[in-house]
Image: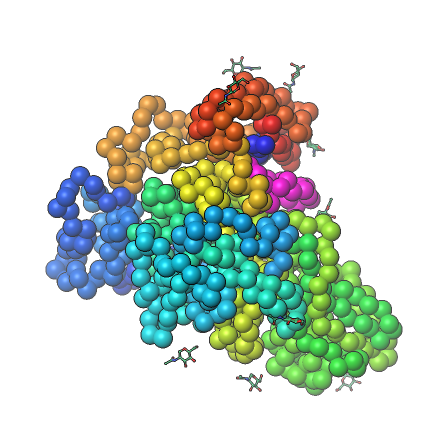
Amino acid sequence: MVKLNFVVRSVVITLAFTLSLCDANDDDGNPKFHIVYLGSIPETKASYSPTSHHLNMLQQVLDGSNPTKSLVRSYKRSFNGFAAMLTNQQAEKLTEMEGVVSVFPSKTLQTQTTRSWDFLGLPKAPKGHQTIETNLVVGFFDTGVWPESESFSDKCITEPVPKKWKGTCAGGKNFTCNKKLIGARFYTEDSARDNDGHGSHTASIAAGNDVDNASFYGIAEGTARGAVPSSRIAAYKVCSSAGCADHGILAAFDDAIADGVDVISVSFGAAAALNLDTDSVAIGSFHAMAKGVLVVQSAGNAGPYPGTVASVAPWLITVAASTLDRQIVDKVILGNGKVLTGRSVNSFKSNGRRVPIALSNGNSSECEKEYADICGCLDKKLVKGKIVLCDNHAEAEPKSAGAVGTIAKIDLADLNLGYVTIMPSVSLLPKDYDVVKLYTNSTKDPKAEILKSESGQDQSAPRAAAFSGRGPNAIISEILKPDISAPGVNILAAYSPIGSPTEDPSTDNRSVHYNILSGTSMACPHVSGIAAYVKNFHPDWSPAAIKSAIMTSAKPMITNLTYDVGEYAYGSGQANPILAINPGLVYDINKEDYVQMMCNLGYDNRKIKLISGELNPCKGAAHRSLVRNLNYPALTVLVEPRVHINISFSRIVTNVGLANSSYRVRLTSKPEVINITVKPRVLSFKALNEKKSFVVNVIGMIPNETAVISSREPLK
Ligand SMILES: *[C@@H]1O[C@H](CO)[C@@H](O)[C@H](O)[C@H]1NC(C)=O
Ligand SMILES: *[C@@H]1O[C@H](CO)[C@@H](O)[C@H](O)[C@H]1NC(C)=O
Ligand SMILES: *[C@@H]1O[C@H](CO)[C@@H](O)[C@H](O)[C@H]1NC(C)=O
Ligand SMILES: *[C@@H]1O[C@H](CO)[C@@H](O)[C@H](O)[C@H]1NC(C)=O
Ligand SMILES: *[C@@H]1O[C@H](CO)[C@@H](O)[C@H](O)[C@H]1NC(C)=O
Ligand SMILES: *[C@@H]1O[C@H](CO)[C@@H](O)[C@H](O)[C@H]1NC(C)=O
Ligand SMILES: *[C@@H]1O[C@H](CO)[C@@H](O)[C@H](O)[C@H]1NC(C)=O
Ligand SMILES: *[C@@H]1O[C@H](CO)[C@@H](O)[C@H](O)[C@H]1NC(C)=O
Ligand SMILES: *[C@@H]1O[C@H](CO)[C@@H](O)[C@H](O)[C@H]1NC(C)=O
Ligand SMILES: *[C@@H]1O[C@H](CO)[C@@H](O)[C@H](O)[C@H]1NC(C)=O
């Protein structure tokens, strides 16, 4: 019933990631946006005024200029800090000042762009504690929402806004809330209205109403619905189409925690993992966790390469994207009658006629061959009125050159990405693309007809999507990331009618209320919804207990070792909302445990004091080897190959199942090169919330650099 995931990986991977921060490093002396993070709000000093403290600190570095002009935002509701315009020199001076945890330039993070709930086994209209569900508030940090979307109407909610809600509807002009969409704030642009589509999509996946007959031009038709359709939505617009700025993200955390949200869903992230004290999502979510608010974040879309997961803090749930059993396919019929199947989402209905095919690099002097091959440059004379072959997915140039369709080659790594197309287009795997190329080259009058996309079956689901960011965790290798998988490929959900369905208004000005998107951005709100669903049944559970329940009840997924590294691709497996309600045992973690982990990681004691707000946060001797004893619902260790290992992990489980119950250890796969022992083998409980500890010992040797030992350790 309670499963532990096990990863022992042989290579000590040294990951050297550099996020491009050119803006901050080129010291042209001009002030730039910086975040000055000061940790927790001091509780002891009753007279403490954060804003005057912030202004005072600024005054000391500003050489006489007006600090109120340079202070852009004060964070003071849920944690302490401010955003200000500072030169690099001033930022450096502040770093040295007392009470400062970190000073870093405000970066811009990127958004990581339904049948899915049926696939996950969550029945429609879940028979939960409806009155509690209507008390749940899920906060979305995203591009805002389209308040008039059917997914956000309050026609099914009769209960008034929950009493605990301290937020507000400040979405800007012409933005109206209702009993479902109860809160709105914006930190970019001039309203919380979603003019992109991403934010409406993610919010409706987690908490949207049931909306019948939703589809994208008839594709993926069905009922669009969220996991917790009766719960409330609060939109915090921190992203515009240009990205999501750190200073706005921290402001949204400062507000949302104080507003009283239960779960925060964050579908954006940095390009690569950042240290905990310069990662705005890690900082904000730490203070959320301290107040009992669970934060869920997407793993990022930089996969399938190792070490690409960008969400690394242990108090976050990090979500990988997996495939759905519904696949969206489109077909192309060649002049010789051969039919090939591709992966794009093509809404354009064929008129039944076959159209001439053109090679992009035909007899032309207009474009360089290499550029023409990938349809980066096309000769209008060659392609006008024809379907053009492109060695890479490209549609803007073919469309502007007058082509009426494209047949493109896609890499294996893009296999799972179903692009929404802007004209009749089909993306083929290399072997099928070569068939078309050969046919075109060897036929006098090559023709093809591209059909509108339709739904098909994918028997191999769930599989980790190729694009989904992979572990190991580049900052804390002992913490498994990603944590969990959820559907993130070809998800139909609400959209903004003024957003371009392909996110490029210059080539695609269609207006839709439902759209199909892929990305870990779409996987994340599935788990935010599940977290709210679990909280619905267990309102008193801590964020870590909810996370543990979701991880230990996950459905096992298949490892594909050719590029996947098991748990590093999908975490504990595919989230299962129904089983997550009754996990039997949970691995709980409180704020002090996380703080102790930071001590063990070797973080500066002074900083940990500020972050935790505790006088003496590091208890006992801190040592890196103790990091793996954080009570995480997964065991992970990186080891050197051909070196004898003898490693122990301690864990404590809390009984949330039957008062009188026993759990026995069962190893579901026994790797030959190592021995795993668990002591004791049986845990017997007499009462609810009783805690028992056990130790897992791993002895052996990993034979070579490529070996990955991945095993599951369930307690039955
Ligand atoms: C307000 O929003 C509605 C719904 O999108 C729109 O029809 C109306 O034109 C908007 N009014 C203003 C002043 O923007
Ligand atoms: C949904 O579509 C079906 C068939 O297309 C139709 O019978 C049904 O009435 C529609 N339902 C709604 C709520 O529009
Ligand atoms: C290529 O174009 C030139 C000039 O337009 C023409 O003379 C030549 O026959 C063409 N070659 C082929 C193979 O089409
Ligand atoms: C097309 O055919 C020509 C001659 O028949 C051959 O030289 C060329 O390699 C072929 N190109 C492709 C892409 O098949
Ligand atoms: C969309 O763009 C097409 C040209 O690509 C144009 O004909 C059409 O009027 C545009 N529609 C809207 C609503 O702007
Ligand atoms: C693993 O993935 C690769 C690349 O997608 C694929 O070629 C191979 O068939 C997969 N192996 C299994 C066992 O599914
Ligand atoms: C493993 O380590 C433990 C404690 O450090 C020790 O008691 C035990 O003998 C070791 N076992 C082996 C096989 O090295
Ligand atoms: C638990 O089980 C024991 C023995 O099976 C029994 O004596 C005891 O009454 C049970 N306690 C509860 C609370 O059911
Ligand atoms: C595992 O344990 C068995 C029995 O104690 C022993 O024979 C074997 O050598 C051990 N293997 C490793 C890899 O330590
Ligand atoms: C590395 O070890 C694994 C597991 O024992 C084995 O399957 C694989 O063949 C080995 N690879 C090399 C290159 O020795």
> Which color scheme does this rendered protein use?
rainbow
Q: Which is more toward the observer, 556 or 155?
A: 155
Q: Which residue is drawn at 56% across and 69% down?
A: 514
- Span highlighted in magenta in the image: 551-575
Q: Which residue is drawn at 36% across and 46% down?
A: 288
Residue 598 against residue 470 in the figure, above or below: above
Q: Position of residue 135 (x, y in %)?
A: 40, 52
Q: Where is residue 206 in the image (x, y as percent from the top left)?
A: 50, 56
Residue 628 against residue 472 in the figure, above or below: above
Q: Give the side of residue 366 with respect to residue 435, left or right.
A: left
Q: Which is more toward the observer, 24 or 214?
A: 214
Snapshot quadrant of residue 366 = bottom right
Count of marks overlaid on the render: 0
Q: Position of residue 235 (x, y in %)?
A: 40, 61
Q: Which is more toward the observer, 321 or 408?
A: 321
Q: Give the side of residue 488 with respect to residue 174, left or right.
A: right
Q: Residue at x 32, y 51 (%)?
A: 164
Tell me if residue 332 is in the magenta stretch: no
Q: Which quadrant of the figure shows ligand 9? A: top right
Q: Can residue 40 be seen in this view?
A: yes
Q: Give the side of residue 50 with respect to residue 678, left or right.
A: left
**Helix, strand or loop: magenta stretch:** loop
